[in-house]
Image (cartoon, rainbow, N blue to C red):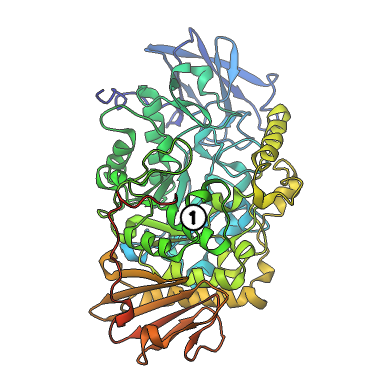
Amino acid sequence: MTVPPHTSLPALGAWPTENGTVFRLWSSQTSAANVVLYDTATESGSDQHSRHLPLHPCGNGIFEAEIPGVGPGVRYRFELDGQILPDPYARWCPDGVHEPAAVWEPTYTFQHAPPLLKQNERIIYELHVGTFTPEGTYRAAQQKLGYLHDLGVTVVELMPLTAFPGRWGWGYDGVTLFAPFAGYGTPEELMAFIDEAHRLGIAVLLDLVLNHFGPDGNYLGAYSPVYFTQRHKTPWGDALDYAEPHMRRLVLDAALHWLRVYRFDGLRLDATHEIFDESTPHILAELVARAHTQEGGRPLLYCEDDRNDPFLVTQFGMDGLWADDFHHQVHVLLTGEQDGYYRAYRPDAAELARCIERGWLYEGQLWPLGDRSPRGTSADSLAASNLVYCLQNHDQIGNRATGDRLHVAAGTELFLAASMLLLFLPMTPLLFQGQEWLASAPFLYFSDHAGELGRQITAGRQQEFQHFEAFSVSQSAPDPQQESTFSSSVLDWTELHHGNHARAYQLYRRLLRLRRDDPVLKTGERAQVRAGARGPLLWVTRQNEAGIRVLLVNFTSQPVALDTLVGSDATLLLASSDHSIQSMLPPQMAVLLEVTAVPAALADAGVWADPKVWTGKS
C-alpha cells in the first residue's frame, strides 16, 4: 500500500490570522457545521452567551470559515449537525478536555539554542511533572533544572503532556495531541522550562503516545469513525488507522508541533510495537524523515518497543530503543522475583553478562511465556548509544502493586552496586526521578476518571495483582482513584541531604562525573566492553587506547577474593560503599578499578553460544 495523500490536506483546528481566526474541521458524516464562540471563560460551558456561526463546506468533508475580530484566548467548540463537541485539534484546553478550547498562538520568545550532545553524552532523566515537585508545575520543575545539571543529567524526558481528563494522571490517556495538560501550567510556562533547560545545556524529550487515545475525552470518533480500524487490536481497543489520510496527518503534525513550536529536542514514542501500519513508508519511518528535515538540528527519536528488533534504528532511522531485557535481568538477579514477565529471566549473573555483551538477552530464543514464539534478533548492528538501559522507570515501578522502587525490593547496597553497573556501561542510561537519592516516595499508578470508568479502573487494578505471589501479603493495591495514591507519589526533596539518601546522591554525582571525564568511560563503543561471571560475581571491562577499567559486582552475601581476579596492580577509582576492601570484595558491593592489563582470569570473556542454540529459561 502506497502512502495516502495526506500531505495535501489542510491543517485543522483554529488558526489566528491578521483579521481574526480561521476555524476548520473535517468530518466524514456531517452535512452542516458551525463554530460556537463563547463570550467569557467563566461562561464557556454554557450556551447562554454563545454565538453559532456557520462553517462553509469546502468538499471532501472539510468545513471552514474565517471569523473576523476573533483572536487568541477566545473559547470555542464545533457544532456538527446540531451536536456541540470539543475540538480534538485544539492547541490549548485551559478548562479541560471536555470544555471549549481556546484559540491560541505562541507568544513566548526563546532565548537559548538547544544543546548539541554527542551520542555518548546522553544521560536521560525521566520525570513526571505532577509528582516531581510538591507544586507539580512546569515552573516548579524549572527551578530544579540547576540541580539536574549539577547532578550530571544532559537529557530530561517528560512523561506525556498531551491533555487528559481529571486533575492528575500518568498522561498515557491523553486525547488532544496538540494541547499540553493545563494542570501543569500554561504553554508559555512549558516553553520557559525548555528554554531554561537549553540555557543549562540540557536537552528535553517528550514522551508521546501514538498507539492509542484515552477512553475519556476522545472526540475523534464523533467527527469520523474512520480514524480507527478494527483490522488491528491494541490493549486499549481498535488501533489508529494510519491508512486513513487524516489520522496520518494528525499524528505527524502533532509530533512536529512539539518539536517546532515548543522546541523539544526529541521524542520518546510509547509502545511502538502497538503501532500498526501497512503503508509505504511506515508511519514511523515517515515521522523520522519529516522530523529530520526541520530547522534547528536533528531531534532525538527513541522507541519503547518489546520486540528486541533493531529495524526501528537500522531501517527507520530512530536513535535508539528501550532495551528492557537489561532491566528485567538486573531486577530478577537483585530480588529473585519471578512474577509476571520476570519468569522469563533467571537470577544468574552469567545471564546478565550475556545481556551486556549481546545488547539484550532474547535474540531469537523462544519466549517462555504466552505463545512461546521466538523473540528478538541480534543487536550486533546497534551502537551502545542506541540501547537505553535503566534500573527502573515509570512502568517498572508503577506496574508494581505498591509502586515500590528497586532499592526497597533489593536493599540499598545491592541497588547502589547495580547503579555502578548502569553508569559504568557505555549504553545510554536512563534514571527515574529521585532514583539518585533513594527517594522514599513510591510511584504508584494514579488516575482521576469520573463515574463508571473510575470504578472500573479501581476494580481492574485490584484484579491485576491477585495472582502475584510477591504481593500475596497485601490485601489490596492502593486505589488509583484516591487522591492519596497520587499525593504519596510526590517526591520529598527534604530527604535529599540526609543519611543514605545523601550517600546515594554523592555516589551518582561521582559516577556521572567519571562518565563525563574519565578517558576510558567517556567513550561509547560496544566493542570495548567485555563481561562475564564467576558464579555470582559479575565483572565488566572497558578498554581503549587511554587505558583499562574493570567493574566488579558481588551480588552475594559472602565476600569474594580479589587477588585471584585482578592482581596487585589495580587502583581503586570508586566503590559503592565505604566498607574496607583490601584483598576481599565485601558482599553486595561494586568496585571500579583501573588496571594496566586485562587480568588473565577475565581474558576469556565474550565467548557465547550461538543464540539460536541458547534457549533461555527451560
Residue drawn at (34%, 29%) of the image: 277
Residue visible at 31% across and 79% down in the picture? 519
Which x, y percent locates residue 571? 39, 89
Residue to which mark 1 is pinned? 328
Residue sitting farthest toward the left: 545
The percent coordinates of residue 514 (x first, y second) are 41, 77
Q: Outermost residue, front direction?
A: 618
Residue 103 shows in the view: no
Whether 43 is drawn above or below 168: the answer is above
Residue 129 lies, in percent from the top left, at 58, 52
| Res 9 → quadrant | top left
Q: Nearer the viewer, residue 88 or 336?
A: 336
Asked whether the viewer can see residue 29, the reply is yes
Q: Residue at x 59, y 10 (%)?
A: 82
133 displayed left or right of 508: right
Q: Secondary structure at mark 1?
A: helix
Residue 375 is left or right of residue 104, and the answer is left
Q: Is residue 573 above or below residue 242?
A: below
